[in-house]
Amino acid sequence: MIDRVHWINKAKLVKFILDCQDLENGGISDRPDDDVNIYHTYFGVAGLSLLEYRGVKAIDPAYALLVDVINRIILNK
């Protein structure tokens, strides 16, 4: 990435993303209490992955795809 991960307060960012969840219907919004959408849901989950949130599989930031998928389809591993 840009070698500036130390600028991010991981705990606060994880809390913010989780606060943007719609616990009844699913999905993630851009701000707490806003309507969820597919864009923010996808990149919210991607952000949780990059922040190494437990239970979320690793993604490749260059492709924005699961590392498992990259290895299986693109790298033929």
Image: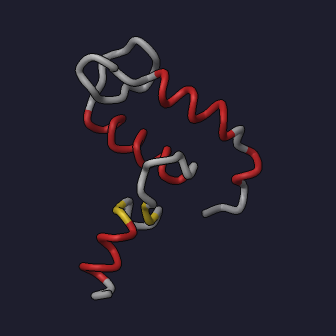
Residue at horizontal 33%, vertical 43%? 42
Number of marks present in the image shown:
0
Q: Return the x and y of residue 38 as percentages of the image width and height.
A: 26, 36
What residue occupies the far front of the structure in this picture? 55
Residue 4 appears in which quarter of the rendering? bottom right
The answer to whether 20 is drawn above or below residue 43 in the figure is: above
Residue at horizontal 34%, vertical 79%? 71
Q: Return the x and y of residue 6 as percentages of the image width and height.
A: 76, 50
The answer to whether 46 is drawn above or below residue 59 in the figure is: above
The quadrant of the image that shows the N terminus is: bottom right
Residue 23 appears in which quarter of the rendering? top left
What residue occupies the far top of the structure in this picture? 33
Q: Return the x and y of residue 12 as percentages of the image width and height.
A: 65, 30
What residue occupies the far bottom of the structure in this picture? 76
The quadrant of the image that shows the C terminus is: bottom left
Q: Return the x and y of residue 56 as percentages of the image width and height.
A: 43, 50
What residue occupies the far right of the structure in this picture? 6
Drawn side of residue 59 relative to residue 24, left or right: right
Drawn side of residue 75 relative to residue 61, left or right: left
The answer to whether 20 is drawn above or below residue 51 in the figure is: above
The colour style of the image is secondary structure
Residue at horizontal 39%, vertical 69%? 67
The answer to whether 36 is drawn above or below residue 54 in the figure is: above
